[in-house]
Image (tube, grey):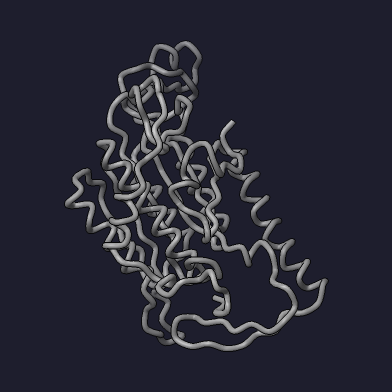
Amino acid sequence: MIQDQPTFPSGGASTTAAALVELCRRTPPPCHDDPRRGSMHALAGPYLSSFRGGGIEFDELRAYQPGDDVRSIDWRVTARTGRPHSRVFREDHEQPVWLLTDLGPAMRFGTRRAFKSVAAAEASALLSWWSVEAGDRVGGFVLGEDSCVAHPPRGQQARHWAFLQALANATEPVEAKDEDDNAAVSLDAALGRLATAVHPGSRVFVISDFEGLGPAGRRHLVQLARWCDVRCVLVYDVLEAHAPPNGEYRIHDGSGSRAIAVGGRRPRQDYEDLFHERVEELRHFCQAHRIELMALRTDENPGDVLSPSRSRMGGRS
């Protein structure tokens, strides 16, 4: 975190549960007309979503896929075609909301307003709070620097406090550990746990900078997108997208500081190209699998960015 940036306030490296609650209370969810519920907030967006699950409204008949409920197999069509087919229904009842919030070591970076980890915690707090307000049950996984804590779906605000507290706790720095300590959980592993826990028809949000997304994590996202409404929130800092001017900067990691020098046009261009190539690759991946991708910069208001009228980078067609 560059210390001489005037826009970075004290306390931007971590947050508290009380601060997250205050953010939620002063940020009402944007509302939109929706034919399923009459009025829906930003979690569903301005279109009829294709949530799939155990509702009572028939949606389509398609070839059986691994993971389908055996009870959904249409045996008449299966016998007639010689291939297993499943009946898919559109959800018409409460849809659990699951959030995977990445607050790992790579997220502890920022030059404007807050670390990426704090911005991600704020976004997760808003999405979860809005869901509870709408009557949905909310659960998820909080991926910290050395653990991945599960929170089963719950609907009461009183019980939801534990989730907000876990988000806040995970933004705090942890004590340095021995190099042999391999307790850290990867984003791919966390996505695997999420894919195992989530039931078809759920809404799923993955909030991360996605630097740690590997082949296994992509497979888990594809699996989730087959049965759920999946949305990724890419959290990034302006310094990741645009290298700073040449010069010397003092950086701080929460426990100490040191000076680094930035210079040369070619290195700066290569630095920026790496970020934009990674974002473009993520965007194409999301488009290919009908996953909506939103972008949240650390100096932006999460409530504004999560509005369905803003910040879509592509994904759903």
What residue is drawn where x is 31% and y is 27%?
54
What residue is drawn where x is 31% and y is 66%?
16
Q: In the rendering, at what x and y percent does residue 82 appear?
A: 49, 17
What residue is drawn where x is 40% and y is 85%?
177
Q: In the rendering, at what x and y percent does residue 63 appear?
A: 49, 24
What residue is drawn where x is 68% and y is 84%?
248
Is 289 on the left-hand or right-hand side of 225? right
Seen in the picture, residue 219 relative to 168 is either above or below; the reply is above
Residue 287 occupies quadrant = top right
Is 292 on the left-hand or right-hand side of 79? right
Seen in the picture, residue 173 relative to 140 is either above or below; the reply is below
Is 298 on the left-hand or right-hand side of 284? left
Seen in the picture, residue 87 relative to 113 is either above or below; the reply is above
Query: Quadrant location of the N terminus?
Result: bottom right
Q: In the rendering, at what x and y percent does residue 302 appear?
A: 45, 52
Seen in the picture, residue 147 relative to 306 is either above or below; the reply is below
Report the front residue among 287 and 275: 275
In the image, farthest residue toward the front: 6
Report the front residue among 291 and 64: 291
Q: In the rendering, at what x and y percent does residue 31 appear?
A: 39, 32
Report the front residue among 113 and 155: 113
How many circles with numbers are drawn on the protein?
0
Query: Quadrant location of the C terminus?
Result: top right
Is 129 on the left-hand or right-hand side of 173? left
